[in-house]
Image (cartoon, rainbow, N blue to C red):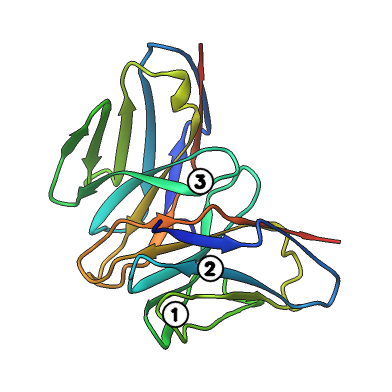
């Protein structure tokens, strides 16, 4: 069953703690994205990767880090430097050059304890 | 920065009526896409319109694009209760090939049965 899997669905972070959100896709897509969504708001781009071992900052990259060591995986780490991490995080992928449509996972809700 | 602003922010209509939502953006674009999000879920792609197109149809959806006004509209005809969701526009600004997608603030549509 092809798709994008985000885990966990709910995640809690303690003050000063780093947490990592998982995003895995078995669609053989080249590009992957991370977005943050605050309640009742639109999506804001955190990081995106067009190809393995390469990624670019989005509009709100401060306090976040990513890696793209494998084509199917694009984990997002929310560091302690991110002072307001409570949000809904969405991962997306795109087949590659010439393909514009994004495919989304079902999201991870991160809350601060 | 969010490229797109949707209006209205919220819309409530009766089943069978048409729903129109608008998206305005700030810079020139390669294409504009519309996505739908059910509460607490990921986004689903609806339709894409390129910068050289003025109108596009897909089933009950009609999208228009006016590049001179930097705006797009999404019309859902003969709405159903199942159309209740948030709708977002997303733009891919030039240069071509960056595939950096910026989303608008969204319109929350409620269709009353």
Q: Residue furthest front?
A: A1
In the figure, residue A85 lies in which quadrant? bottom right
Please state, as top left, top right, bottom left or bottom right, where the N terminus of chain A lies in the image.
Answer: bottom left
Label 3 secondary element: loop
- In this rendering, the label closer to the viewer, 1 or 3: 1
User: Along the horizontal axis of the image, is A59 left or right of B71?
Assistant: right
- Neighbour class for label 1 at 10 Å: few (<14), some, many (≥20)? some
Percent x, y of residue A15 = 86, 72
The single residue placed furthest to the left in the displayed view is B52
To which chain does the residue with label 1 belong?
A
Q: Are marks 1 and 3 on the same chain?
A: no
Query: Would you say the residues marked 1 and 2 are in contact, meaning their CB atoms lie under 8 Å apart?
Result: no
Q: Is residue B61 visible?
A: yes
**Pointer 3 local density, CA inside 10 Å: few below 14, some 14–19, many at least 20:** many
State left or right for residue A50 relative to residue A66.
left
| Residue B105 image label | 3
Say whether mark 2 and mark 1 are on the same chain.
Answer: yes
Q: Residues within 10 Å of mark 2 (few under 14, many from 20)?
A: many
Q: Nearer the viewer, mark 1 or mark 2?
A: 2
The image's mark for residue A56 is: 1
The CA distance from mark 2 to mark 3 is 24 Å
- How far apart marks 1 and 3 lie (CA) works out to 23 Å
Is B107 above or below relative to B48?
A: above
Would you name the residue on which mark 2 appears? A23
Chain letter belonging to callout 3: B
């Amino acid at each position: 069953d092809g798709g994008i899997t985000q885990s966990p669905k709910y995640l809690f972070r303690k003050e000063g703690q780093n947490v990592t959100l998982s995003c895995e896709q078995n669609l053989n897509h080249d590009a992957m994205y991370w977005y943050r969504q605050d309640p009742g708001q639109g999506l804001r781009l955190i990081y995106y990767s067009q190809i393995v071992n390469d990624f670019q900052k989005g509009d709100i990259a401060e306090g976040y880090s990513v890696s793209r060591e494998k084509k199917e995986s694009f984990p997002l780490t929310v560091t302690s430097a991110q002072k307001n991490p409570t949000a809904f995080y969405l991962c997306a992928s795109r087949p590659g050059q010439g393909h514009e449509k994004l495919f989304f996972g079902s999201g991870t809700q991160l809350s601060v304890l | 920065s969010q490229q797109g602003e949707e209006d209205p922010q919220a819309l409530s209509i009766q089943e069978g009526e048409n729903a129109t939502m608008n998206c305005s953006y700030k810079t020139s674009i390669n294409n504009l896409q519309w996505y739908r999000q059910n509460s607490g879920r990921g986004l689903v792609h609806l339709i894409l319109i390129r910068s050289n197109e003025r109108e596009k149809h897909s089933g009950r959806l009609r999208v228009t694009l006016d590049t001179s006004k930097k705006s797009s509209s999404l019309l859902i005809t003969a709405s159903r209760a199942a159309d209740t969701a948030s709708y977002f526009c997303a733009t891919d600004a030039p240069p071509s090939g960056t595939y950096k997608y910026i989303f608008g603030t969204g319109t929350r549509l409620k269709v009353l049965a």
